[in-house]
Each structure stands twice: as structure tokens, then as C-alpha cells.
Image (cartoon, grey):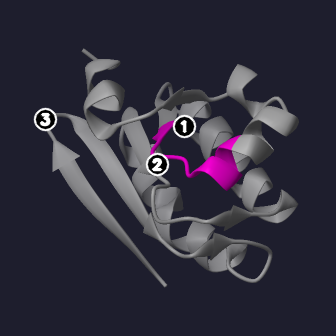
Amino acid sequence: MTVSIEKVKDIQIIHVEYKSLDASKVEEFLKKISDDITQNNKNLIDLSRVDFVDSAGLGSLLSCLKKAKTNNGNLKLYGLTKSVRSLFELMRMQKIFSIYDSKEMAIASYE
């Protein structure tokens, strides 16, 4: 389980390299990215390697969004797999998160 950070201009890209973002990984996930989210105003989370998200994983992403907004920042998502996108649509999370198909589209949304 790894999370890597990439900087593109003033945008921080967080690559989540878990097969699933579920209750067993949420604490570690939040520990790894919480400080990064609060220290940067423009955040992207790459979910292209995540095949499964449960309610705890969804809650952790909502927590990250709230943390970013509390610090006058933003958090956007990109690269959702078909199964993860289906969950987001079922839970109507596309109304809360800005979601993009590609890294390029997500970066362009900040320009």
C-alpha cells in the first residue's frame, strides 16, 4: 500500500496505489495524506489504481475534501475506475466532488 505525491506547477497530485480503499486501509490512508492536503490549496487524487471503495473509503475522501475546504483549498478526483465511478454515482458523490476522466483534464480545471 503506497501513496505517492507529484507536483505539477502549484497542483499537488496524490496517487493512491491501493487496490481497495476500505475500512482496513482508511486510517493509514488519512495518516499519509492529511498533512499534504492541508498544506496545499490545489489537490488532485488519482484513483485510477483503486478498484473498490467501501463506505469507510468514501468517508475518508469526504474528510479530505472537508479538510481542504477548511483550509481554503480544494480537492478534485480523477481516473475513477468503472466500479468506483458507479459507487460515486449511486451515492450521488459526483454532486459533491469534481471528478475528471484524466489527469490532463483535472489539471486544466485549476487553470
Looking at the picture, which amino acid does disc 2 mark?
A: Ile
Helix, strand or loop at mark 3 = loop
Q: Are marks 1 and 2 in contact (CB under 8 Å)?
A: yes
Left or right of residue 27: residue 4: left
Determine which residue is flagged by label 2: 37
Determine which residue is flagged by label 3: 9
Residue 41 visible here: yes
Determine which residue is flagged by label 1: 68
Q: Residue furthest left?
A: 9
Q: Earlier in the sequence, mark 1 or mark 2?
A: 2
Point 38% across, 60% down: residue: 15
Q: Where's residue 61, x and y in %? A: 66, 50
Helix, strand or loop at mark 2 = helix
Left or right of residue 105: residue 18: right
Point 44% across, 34% down: residue: 101
Q: Residues within 10 Å of mark 1 (few under 14, many from 20)?
A: many
Q: CA distance from mark 3 to mark 1?
A: 18 Å
Helix, strand or loop at mark 1 = helix
Decide which of 67, 53 is in the foreground and name it: 53
Bounds of the magenta segment: 77-85
Looking at the picture, which amino acid does disc 3 mark?
A: Lys
Looking at the picture, which amino acid does disc 1 mark?
A: Ala
Point 35% across, 18% down: residue: 109
The count of marks equals 3
Q: Residues within 10 Å of mark 2 (few under 14, many from 20)?
A: many
Q: Quadrant of residue 25?
A: bottom right
Decide which of 72, 56 is in the foreground and name it: 56
Residue 96 visible here: no
